Amino acid sequence: MAVSIVKCLTADVYLLIVSILLRSIYAEIVAGSSTGGETPHRRFEYKYSFKGPHLSQSDGSVPFWVHTGNAIPSSDQIRITPSLRSQKGSVWTKNTIKFDHWEAEVTFRVSGRGRMGADGLAVWYTAGQGLTGPVYGAADQWNGIGIFFDSFDNDGKKNNPAVIVVGNNGNLVYDHQNDGTTQSLGTCLRDFRNKPYPVRAKITYYKKTLTIMINNGFTPNKDDYEFCTRVENMVIPVEGYFGISAATGGLADDHDVLSFLTFRLTEPGQEPPQVEQEMPKEEKDKYQEEFLNFQQELDKKKEEFQKEHPDVQGQPIEDLYESVNDREIRQVFEGQNRIHLEIKQLNRQLAMILDEQRRYVSVITEEVSKRGAQSGQVPNQDIDALIATQREVLNSLNDVKTSLSASLKQVDSAQHVQNAAGGALSSYETIQHFNDIKEHLHVVKRNVEHIIQKNSGPSEKVKCPELPPLPSCLSTSHFVVFVVIQSLLFFGYVMYKSQQEAAAKKFF
């Protein structure tokens, strides 16, 4: 037991010492990348960057970038290659980069179903656009640098996935069999496949030193970078293109790039170049000419509109559109008109029900009086209860009609007040009118429910007098005679038809 405790304490001490050493090394690297402890000035360059949302345009293109091969731009990312076999794709900047120092932040996701993937993704800075080729979907023998995120272990040394930095002067052929390890300037082992969050790579070229920092994608913290590798005395082309490429082989992964952000770095003490100086005079003149043409076209359309609509000439443009208050008042008017129409329709239906109910009461009263006069007996209690119930229904319907009429008057009065005020009705009065209408409608609802309960009460047990059966129009004997006559006529017609056909056959 004591031995195990000593071993655990020894392991903890070793881990603490390693963490302290790594922190000191990282601090030295960060300090070495700056001058006198001062960080360089960073300025975002939108012409060499892309980021969602609205990453691609309606025609599928990406502003300031060109994509080739199997690359698929979308609104929030660019899928360099889908998870299909033998796919290649790339995306490159249209304009050359002329920065002495720069920094690129790449956010990507490599995902696949298998335990291993292929082939990988590459970030480029080269003198020319390597649109397509055998090196992760880009051209071989490039002039510049390539940062490769290699997924597949070609040499069988179990040193993948890995991040490899390979430089080329335009004459070297990439060593696929050894995963470029014989040509690499720096490397680190990082598993970037199937992470819960996107993987981020920060590539910094400052004072001829290339530094690679990796965020492994285990946390959503965007600034949680770890040191990967560093290459000093790195000479790259003065002008070049940024690019991202990917490829699949026998195994396949989805290679998605969510963003590529480029920053220009300026040494401390030096003034950053002015934005106005970056735009050439020819481009300025072109944009100015386009603006003047647009302004002239707009003035012509204004003159044509004024000629076609002389009644609005000189009227402020704001008066031609509906304000917020006018729109709210119009919506109130429209709502009241709909309520008014619904109440009118309900009032008409209720009047029809009242007429029908009055007719039923009169018919029952007449029938009861006739039977009482014929038999000389007083009507029984069931008939009296039926008559009383029908009269209560009639009274309830009259109350409902009165409530509806009151609601209709409320709506009419509200509309008259609004029309008289010129649409300047206060919100309190409008709410009060609507509350009154709602209260009347609730009264109508209660009255209708009361009528339904009354009709489903004892009146269901009372049965109305049955009508005498209607006399039959056709007796049994008449029906039999009719069938016999029809049968004789049918057989006579058949015999006549057969004789006619036999006579016709004699002529052939």
Image (cartoon, rainbow, N blue to C red):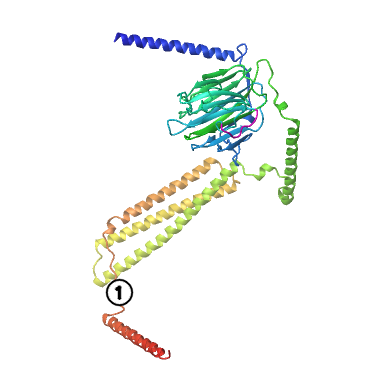
- Please provide percent x and percent y for residue 34: 61, 14
Q: Residue 450: in sight, yes or no?
A: yes
Q: Secondary structure at mark 1?
A: loop
- Residue 169 is drawn in which quadrant? top right
* Residue shown at 44% from the left, 10% from the top: 17
Is residue 128 in the magenta section?
yes
Q: Tell whether 117 sits left or right of 168.
A: left
Q: Look at the image and give the residue range highlighted in magenta.
A: 127-134
Which quadrant is the C terminus positioned in?
Answer: bottom left
Is 148 on the left or on the right of 361, as rendered?
A: right
Q: Where 131 falls versus 340 (above or below)?
A: above
Amino acid type, residue under disc 1 in the picture: Leu
Q: Residue 88: x, y in percent?
A: 55, 36
Q: Which one is nearer the viewer's eye here, 8 or 147?
A: 147
Q: Residue at x 52, y 37 (%)?
A: 87
325 shown above or below 277: below
Residue 73 in view of the camera:
no
Q: Nearer the viewer, residue 219 or 471?
A: 219
At which x and y percent is residue 262? 61, 26
